[in-house]
């Protein structure tokens, strides 16, 4: 049986506290008809909007974190602080952080470990650049990101961690990966996870696809065995469009 799917919205640098509060209330209302057992919904706003979101029937996620609990690290936010305000998930290693803010596989690994130690579930993002795909090295790139990001990491159960495959060339471009391109990479990720955590846990860790997902392409992606949901950027800012993806996924679950 496939694990329960996830639809996660990454708002990036959009929506301050007032908009987040209104969105959270409206989303909670609209999710009333969607059985909780069918799909886990996560919304990841900017840090300052997390307390306003007030998740009901869905989960909150941060978009980044620092790995130390406290200290002289100006501008940073710790896992302990996220825990204190009830954050459930945290995106780590998003390609925008890797490309624009110097995130490395080493810092990704420190963040993943620090989050797990505080009981926050990391959403570990991996994905190749266009030139890496053109050079045919995409599977090795992603295998390396995974093994480095998960170095020395242990989990208690398969829901503790989520992996998001986000090809860089598909993020915010409208160029969604074909279902088969995504599935081929998800199979590679699944094999790595099974090797790393064992068949039982590794076989049930949720692997999301991210990159220009919308209501028109989500079903083709979800038809694939190893695709366990979506990390949605731009489209997650629009409540109706976000809900329609959630409904399409929930409807498929028995
Ligand atoms: C993302 O930022 O994680 C993402 C997938 O963005 P988009 O859906 O806009 O491509």
Image (cartoon, rainbow, N blue to C red):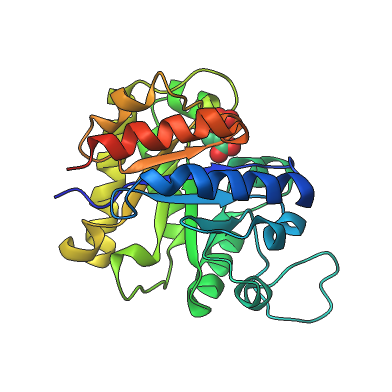
- Seen from the viewer's position, the closer of residues 45 and 54 is 54
Q: Quadrant of residue 87?
A: bottom right
Relative to 205, residue 119 above or below: below
Q: Note whether residue 161 is visible.
A: yes
Q: In this rendering, would 6 be left or right of 196?
A: right
- Seen from the viewer's position, the closer of residues 118 and 71 is 118
Question: Ligand 1: which quarter?
Answer: top right
Relative to 71, residue 50 above or below: above
Residue 78 percent location from the top left of the image: 68, 72
Residue name at image x 39 percent, y 21 percent: 217
- Seen from the viewer's position, the closer of residues 183 and 59 is 59
Residue name at image x 52 percent, y 50 percent: 28
- Seen from the viewer's position, the closer of residues 139 and 37 is 37
Residue 17 percent location from the top left of the image: 77, 52
Residue name at image x 56 percent, y 74 percent: 114
Residue 222 percent location from the top left of the image: 29, 32
Relative to 239, residue 85 above or below: below
């Amino acid at each position: 049986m496939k694990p329960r799917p996830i639809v996660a919205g990454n708002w990036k640098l959009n929506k301050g506290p007032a908009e987040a509060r209104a969105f959270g209330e409206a989303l909670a209302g609209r999710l009333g008809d969607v059985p909780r057992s069918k799909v886990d919904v996560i919304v990841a706003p900017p840090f300052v909007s997390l307390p306003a979101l007030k998740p009901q029937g869905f989960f909150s996620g941060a978009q980044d974190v620092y790995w130390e609990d406290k200290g002289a690290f100006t501008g940073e936010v710790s896992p302990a602080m996220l825990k204190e305000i009830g954050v459930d998930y945290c995106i780590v290693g998003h390609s925008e952080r890797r490309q624009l803010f110097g995130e490395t596989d080493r810092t990704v690994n420190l963040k993943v470990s620090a989050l797990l130690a505080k009981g926050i579930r990391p959403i570990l993002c991996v994905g190749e650049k266009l030139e890496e795909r053109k050079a045919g090295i995409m599977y090795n790139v992603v295998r390396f990101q995974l093994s480095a990001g998960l170095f020395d990491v242990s989990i208690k159960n398969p829901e503790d961690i989520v992996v998001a495959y986000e090809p860089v060339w598909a993020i915010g471009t409208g160029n969604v990966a074909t279902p088969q391109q995504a599935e081929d990479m998800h199979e590679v990720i699944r094999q790595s996870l099974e090797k790393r955590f064992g068949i039982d846990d590794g076989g049930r860790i949720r692997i999301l696809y991210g990159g220009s997902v919308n209501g028109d392409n989500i079903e083709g992606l979800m038809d694939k065995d190893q695709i366990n949901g979506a990390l949605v950027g731009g489209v997650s800012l629009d409540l109706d469009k976000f809900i329609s993806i959630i409904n399409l996924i929930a409807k498929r679950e028995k």
